[in-house]
Amino acid sequence: MSETSERAGSAQERGQRLSVVVGRALLPIAVVAAILAVLPPFWFEDSPYTTSLAVKALVFASYGIGFNLIFGCTNQLFLCVGALAGIGGYGTAITADRSSLPMAAAIAAGTAGAALIGGLLSWIAVRRSLGVIFTGIVTLVFSLAFANFLLGQRDLTGSETGLVITGIPSGIADDQVGGYYLFAGVVVGFLLVFRVLQLSHVGWAFRGLRDDEMAAELAGVDVARYRIYAATVGSAMIGLAGALYAYSSGFVSPDTYAFQNVDVRVLVLVAFGGLGALVGPVIGAGVLAVVDERLATAQGQFLDFDVIQLREALYGVFVIAIFLGFRRGVVPAVVTLARRIGGRRRRETGPPRPAPSER
Amino acid sequence: MKAVVLDGIVIGLAFGLLGVGMTLVYGLGGVINLAYGQIVVLGAIIASLVLERGHSQAFAAAVGVLAAIGVSLLLDLTLLRAVYRRHGEERILLGLLLTLGAAFVIGGLLTARYPTGALFISITGEPVSILGVPMSRGSIWASVIALAVGGVLLLFLGLTTFGRGLRSVIQDETGARLVGINPSFVRTVVFALSGALAGVVAVTQSMNGPLEVNKGFELTTFALIVTVVGGLGSVAGAFLAGLLLGVVNALSAHYIGQYFTSVILLGVAALTILVRPRGLLGR
């Protein structure tokens, strides 16, 4: 806001302008919050099944916002969202189990663990600017290592059976509306953090390094530092969401955080909503929840396959289609199209970002 | 101890082939094929289906290898064409994302259709004593096949005109184009070649024990670790790293525990990136 304040005449004018800027920045978040707040009475009323579906969608939206910060803003392909959430979940469960710490402290411990590991992975991958390929490799290998670790440390993690969490306050179980509002609050909180980062100097650095890393580096942006920064904050978000999810579902198991169950889904929903877009993950999570529900009720046969078993393959198709066809996300593409049809005849910038390197 | 190391070498040879398949494709076009493990599994499942029909093991193995080549060609001609149209960082990223999508499509379809599918080529016969350690016939066959395939591959890359053309594309794509080499043709051939290696690994792995349908992700990760440790784009490095990591894998599985080995392998990969990002024999 510094550039506006220089030109501002009186203090009053300045205040007005500031409130307009802040209002505009917060508008999408306010809309999301309002929709989330009125959704329960309209949509799922008392059905525990629908409520748990909605909770799951909100959890994935939270993962998505964290991942969006890491991948969408700073181009680090973290293929370990499930593992980071698992560190949050298991960290919390084990801390609560082994010590007499209160719930909040256990959650804080789990979140800090995820943030630390996420930052460390990013540090390994961005050292000497090794680039996107090392990030992908390191994080994917980490996912496998974490999954095997969970299976192997039977005493600590309970292996396949997982751990049951005790001392859950009543009302936040994931088939209850309390759990829904808890995660709605988490989503709104994450969106606020994301927005604040976008508007601060960090956001400028993110945009610079995403558009042209070399130019950003030359302009004095410490690219490696901002990458690690984004990875740490994003991982903390994912870890916190994973920890809270563990509490609301009452147990943790390797399946809850498996690569196959978490990472593709998060990748699809973030890409669907548009990489780096503020509310993209929320929209993506909502759409995927509807798709999932339809799949679950379809129960038909398709070319010899059970429809529900095809989910993994279907997500794969989504990933391919989205990154081949809609580089900036399906939602932004639709918005652009709607604007064009809507008769706003201002000259569009053309098809989004005609890759400069393309011949 | 000696037996464990020998076991490690047997696994390591398979790791090495996987790493070579992955590193060649990366060296040529900057694509890390995250669907590689799923291609191995696909070859294995097809071979197991052929075995079920009552055909001979050799025929089933051949069909499995051909299936792996086929699906690789399909990937190259569809998804990767779109990837190669881009350059630099963007190509790498798109390559990772699209092959990851392909991994889920292949893996998802296979696990949905054959949830308990597995390939097991059992080779009967008395164990053979090597350095005083009795080794199963399956292990011996697997090692001999892997060594033969690796040797032929190195000769092919080193001595033939195509091999020279291939190395020129790795070094300088534009330069290769200028002297009349078609990079896209070379890439297609090499991708098919890496598919063939995947098929061979499917066969050799199943000689030591069943290769299950859900192993794809793990195989991809092993190939990635081997590729990183050996040096991205280095064929000899991948072989060496494969052998080394195979032995590390066997030792840690024997002395520390099966589940902890992937953590150790991750540590090795991370350490390599920090200390020597070019890998053992990287350029």
Image (tube, rainbow, N blue to C red):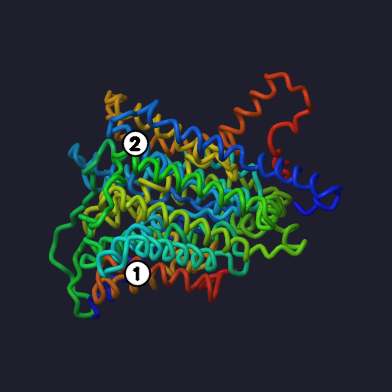
Question: Which residue is under mark 1?
Answer: B246
Residue B21 locus on image (x, y percent):
46, 56
Q: Which residue is mark 2?
A: A53
- Graded by Cα atoms within 10 Å as few (under 14), some (14 to 19) or many (20 or more), the crowding at tag 2 reads some
Q: Are marks 2 and 1 in contact (CB under 8 Å)?
A: no
The one of A311 and A67 positioned closer to us in this rendering: A67
State whether residue A338 is above or below residue A134.
above
Chain of the residue on which disc 1 is drawn: B
For the C terminus of chain A, the quadrant is top right
Chain of the residue that carries numbered disc 2 in the rendered image? A
- Residue A230 vs residue A18: left or right? left
Question: Total marks drawn?
Answer: 2
Is residue B78 visible in the rendered image? The answer is: no
In terms of depth relative to the viewer, which is nearer, A109 or B196?
A109
Percent x, y for residue A247? 31, 53
The amino acid on which the numbered mark 1 sits, given as a three-letter code, is Gly
Place of residue B121 in the rendered image (x, y in percent of width and height, measured from the top left): 21, 52
Tell me: residue A41, above or below residue A279.
above
State which quadrant residue A296 falls in.
top left
Residue A116, position in %: x, y?
A: 47, 67
For the residue pair A72 and B56, the one nearer the viewer reads as: A72
